[in-house]
Image (cartoon, grey):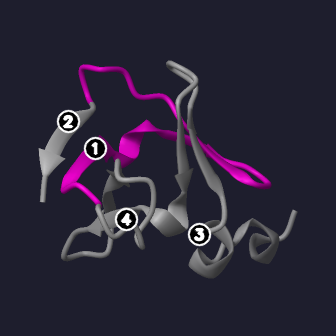
Amino acid sequence: MSEESKVKYLSEIERYELININDGEKYDYLLNNDLIIDEEGNFKYLIINLSGGKFNLFSSKDFLEIPWECVKKIGAKTIILDADDEVIKKVRL
């Protein structure tokens, strides 16, 4: 397999659904959530929007913060997470 075939573009994976295999929870698509990236360009956290989408007029400010280490696989149409309650933080932004 060539190195080019392993490359994923953000514009492609933003349409992937986030699924936590630890509890079966679906967290919508990456497009409706966010990523925290450190100064060196490393992914640190997924920020899961609990309001149900970016364009919800009555959205709350509650989010889940999931460490990037919980991402186990980026598949054909899904991003598989394995995050238990001990690593998931509920935050208000």
Disc 3 designates what residue? 14
Measure the alpha-carbon separation of dots 4 and 1.
10 Å
Disc 1 designates what residue? 64
Measure the alpha-carbon separation of dots 2 and 4.
15 Å
- The numbered mark at residue 34 is 4
**In the image: residue 75, left or right of residue 84:** right
Packing grade of label 4 (10 A; few <14, some 14-19, many >=20) is some
Q: Where 68 falls versus 40 (above or below)?
A: above
Give how far across and how far down residue 51 sits, in percent: 35, 53
Give how far across and how far down residue 84 sits, in percent: 36, 21
Q: Where 83 falls versus 22 (above or below)?
A: below
Q: Where 30 falls versus 39 (above or below)?
A: above
Measure the alpha-carbon separation of dots 2 and 3.
22 Å
Measure the alpha-carbon separation of dots 3 and 1.
18 Å
Q: Badges 2 and 1: C-beta atoms under 8 Å apart?
A: yes
**In the image: residue 77, left or right of residue 85:** right
Disc 2 designates what residue? 89
Q: Badges 4 and 1: C-beta atoms under 8 Å apart?
A: no
Considering every residue shown, the one lying at the far front of the view is 58
Task: Name the residue: 45% across, 62% down.
Answer: 53
Residue type pointed to by label 4? Asp
Residue type pointed to by label 3? Glu
Measure the alpha-carbon separation of dots 2 and 1.
6 Å
For the N terminus, the quadrant is bottom right
